[in-house]
Image (cartoon, grey):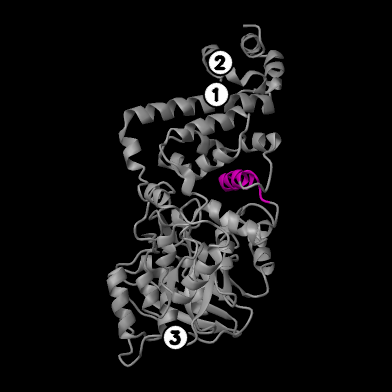
Amino acid sequence: MKVFFNEIENRIWEFSVELEEGESKKAFSFNAGRQEMELQDTSCRFYFDFKPNFPHPDLLALGLLKIFSPFVHRKISFPYPISPAFNDAIKQHYGFFSDTVDENLLPRKSSSGRKAVSFSGGADSVAAASLMPDDTVLIQCCRVKHQNIPLRERWYKVDANKKTLENMPECYSKILVETDFEYLMWNGSYCVYPDNYSFTIPCIFLADHFDIDFIATGDIHAGLTGNETMFNKKFEPNGKALYKAVGLELDSPVKSISEVGTTLINVKTGLHEITTTCAYGEFKKPCMKCIKCFRKYLISAAVGEVSLDEAVLSRFFQHPPVIKFLTNTSRQGIEWIPTLKYIFNKIKNKNPIMRLLEEKVSIYPIDPGYVDKYYSPAVSGLSDVDVKKSVQSKIKNILPSMTDKEESEFQSLNTVKFFEEKKYNAELAEKVREIEFFLAIERYINNRSSEKRIKFNDVNYLVKKYFFLQGDLYPNIISTLASGLYSKVAGRISKILFGRR
């Protein structure tokens, strides 16, 4: 592969590639999930609000690798020769090499030691910024339409994230970099990051301009595994050796905590209201339809920021992402179980679907006592001395640390054993069946039609099991069902629930 560089009007950097023999526009992403993807165009642009200082060639090369590395077959030619040391790092990490090397070029080093956050505007990113030194640079990677590619993911909105950056405290330097590189990779359904931490490219390109030696991400401890119920012994981002080869440390100041912890940090620093966690909504107005909004809504209730509203819950239960989460029996169905168990320890709700979700998560033998605390070994393991000092001094004033017992519980997390137990799978399947039943009732009430026929035997079984609900089960279920198709079933429910036993 050959990569070419063109600077337009001092503030636009354009990169284009030429594929060589043995290379294809189809490849697998190096990012989590290893998605198959196809290169939609051979060029991309980065738009700056100022003329940046031109970076060390190794920095430029690292940024380009974060875009094009999956499509390289044997070697890559960069616009400017790189150092031999960085070429060795490329060989070790990717298995290919560069044929543009300056044997006399020294590796890049930072002199001032300034820190940056690869800032999205999400809750974890905002919390990460709050734990960093006050002169930290917040650099946001923001997508814009590609001039040669049809607009993808029309639902994806970035204005709210920009507003979050604008509203961050003035002690930070706030930098917005717009780019169309995210549209280059397409898997047939959505855009795909080509490599781990591709969103840090603007931080890499601006590292010499701000003399940066540390890039912070917003990875909470679940972000390092993609599953809150799996413990990661490493507690380090993938591929940080590549960053180290160009004089950058890559780490997360919030890797010691859960998303409950980042929420508590944002509440206590007064920044919770400006966080943007939803890609579908507007600033301070999330869509309240997606699974992330559902989870964040429950967490906000657990930490006392909102009160659960029956109408809001009812709307959530009508949307496919939430329904899929509630009824999932695969690995995806047990992610975030510790957080959900923590939530149900904090809030009690009479909604039958919420009660069933509570029962579903109670199947898992996990004590959530550590969820609102930080894991001190992860803080001690931060790779930068100044960042470690800042995090240690700030986090202890907001969150308690895990006890020895809680650390042991946290370190023992492993979901694999659950899927090896037939009893566990049977319990989960039964609970999902019950959730599906109440979701069907919910749909019938809201749509006056049933997408799934509710059988009398199902009603009889479930109403008996949930007799303790008494009148807490929606009264309008009875009147609605009695008005039409399910009048016989309604009579049975009414008889059991409301005292005529």
| Screen quadrant of the N terminus | bottom left
Observer able to see residue 13: yes
Quarter of the image where one finds residue 35 = bottom left
65 inside magenta stretch: no
| Screen quadrant of the C terminus | top right
Q: Say which of 45 and 406 sits in front.
A: 406
Q: Amino acid at mark 2?
A: Val
Q: Amino acid at mark 1?
A: Phe
Locate residue 379 relative to residue 169 in the image: left or right.
left
Q: Which residue is mark 1?
A: 437
Quarter of the image where one finds residue 352 = top right
What segment carries the magenta color?
286-302
Residue at image location 36% in from the left, 78% down from the top:
245
Alpha carbon distance from label 3 to label 2: 69 Å
Q: Amino acid at mark 3?
A: His
Q: Secondary structure at mark 2?
A: helix
Q: Position of residue 484 (x, y in %)?
A: 69, 14
Q: Position of residue 194 (x, y in %)?
A: 43, 63
293 inside magenta stretch: yes
